[in-house]
Image (tube, rainbow, N blue to C red):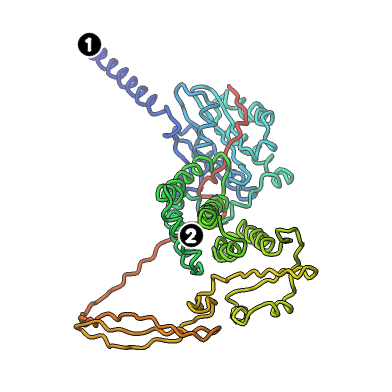
Amino acid sequence: MNQTTTLTRICLFFLLLLGINGYAQTYTIETIPNPKKSASPDYVSNPDQILSADAVEQINSILRTLEDSTTAQVAVVCVNSIGEAVPKDFATALFKKWGLGYQQKNNGLLVLLVKDQHRIEMETGYGLEGVLPDAVCKRIQVEKMVPQAKTGNFDGAVIDGSREIARLISEPEAKAEVYDNSKYVSGKRLEDSGVFVVFLLLVPCLFVFRGISFLAKKRNPVADQIEKAVSQAKGRWAWGLALHMLMPLILGWIVIELRAPLSLQGWQILTIMYVYAGAVALDGRRRRKNAFEKLFSDSTEPERYSREKASGLNNWLNMVVFPMPFIWLKIRDDKALHHLRNHPRQTSDGFVLTKAQENQRDAFLSDYQKVEQELKTVDYDVWQNKDHHIMQLAGYEDLAVTKYEHCNNCHSKAMYFTGDRIVKEATKDQEGSGIKDYTCKACGHHRETAFSIAKIVAATPSNTNSSRTYSSSGSSSWSGSSGSSSSSSSWGGGRSGGGGAGSSW
């Protein structure tokens, strides 16, 4: 009776152990231990101790030397069970999750051994498909790995397979094909959350650039009218928020989704941000151009020339930051202005007019117009037909010149501010007054304009103590791996092309 009870307890104990062991040996993509976790220099994931410690050390040494000499990254995963998962699909998904190989060449390889399915799978990155095509992967398995796996010698199977893989990749021609210089770019690969934060920072940058662009623009009546019209356009706020806030976040999400399949590098992501910022600036120009057409579509040729020249559609900041396309647009607009002012002309009777040379036009200008010409407030062109004694005068006002304004006597743009005078001093109890004096350089007319002076407000003394707090923070850079150390501390973010082979024993 006692012997039966003891035997039963022993059987139950072993059954329990088998159950616990069986549960622990079933892995998913999420639970497979990553050998690069916590900046480890290892390449082998061996959670079920299928390989001995000595074998793991040898394989790590082989694969570390391989990466140091060729930059190719090979991961070895040996587990008892992946449940009902198909080893090929499992290997593809695990390769993608870890991102084996470096992003420029995608020179990664995954070797997966699943003990309960008696299966070995190799999954190659795009950059290794030429060196390790499917047939070569199959040959390595059949000749080097499967015979030893059948006898239970998993140490020998994986060591010999790793040596053969390293030998083939280390061949001079193969090494030149798979070598990826991006391994030695300092810094760590930016995580998806970091990419999203970068695009989030693009939002205030767009607003700041818009503000600086507005302040850098030369002020004149035409530019002010255009800005006012743009600010009052229907749907302007909704469009502005979408363009400056919503779209950068959507673009960031798209980049995060596509950067792994397209192997986007840091500089490529920054280029996308730069191009988008340029597109926003270009859209601002489009809206100002539309406002200009609505405001001045009925202008005469001289008026349109003067207004378009002063419109500021191509400000210097846009041309410096985004030379393409704003310099090209500036050249195109200058050509259009030149044509507007110099295209062939004729009278309503069909008489052809020719433009007089600059040294000849003074004979046709009045004294007032000569003064404007000297002050460069208005530039005059003279068109004539000498045979029929026909003359036409066209004046092009420089609206960017705000120092002078039109005289209310002779109407020349030659009146300027000469100074102001205090007529009545301001006090704490009442406002003061003064006179601004203007004089016309063309006709000598004098004009006075009254202005008021605000009451004097006594300043309230206050003592404030201000303190400044300084903090320092680290910085992150864009690359596929960290530094040029003798071993890699992370996978490089490569991707698989679905190549490789599988064998059973």
Residue 184 location, quadrant? bottom right
Q: Which residue position is annotated with label 2?
A: 226
Locate residue 52 relative to residue 362 in the image: left or right: left
Mark closer to the chain start, 1 or 2: 1
Q: Nearer the viewer, residue 127 or 376?
A: 376
Residue 388 location, x and y as percent?
78, 68
**310 or 216, nearer to the observer:** 310
Q: Amino acid at mark 2?
A: Ile
Q: Position of residue 378 (x, y in %)?
A: 59, 74
Distance, label 1 to label 2, CA atoms, is 104 Å
In the image, residue 93 sits, relative to residue 105, either above or below, namely above
Residue at left offset 66%, top offset 70%: 393
Q: How many marks?
A: 2
Relative to 500, residue 223 above or below: below
* Viewer-nearest residue: 163 or 110: 110
Query: Is residue 364 among what the camera can see?
Result: yes
Residue closest to the eye, 466 or 476: 466
Instruction: Identify the image quadrant of residue 340.
Output: bottom right
Residue depicted at x 55% and y 24%: 119
Please state, as top left, top right, bottom left or bottom right, where the C terminus lies in the image.
Answer: top right
Query: 10 Å neighbourhood of mark 1: few (<14), some, or many (≥20)?
Result: few
Q: Mark 2, residues whose alpha carbon is within 10 Å: few (<14), some, or many (≥20)? A: many
The residue that mark 1 highlights is 1
Is residue 487 something that shows in the picture? Answer: no
SS label for mark 2: helix
- Amino acid type indicated by mark 1: Met
Quarter of the image that includes the N terminus: top left
Residue at (43% x, 46% y) in the render: 246
Helix, strand or loop under label 1: loop
Q: Is residue 398 above or below residue 258?
A: below
Instruction: Residue 402: give x, y in percent of width and height.
Output: 50, 75
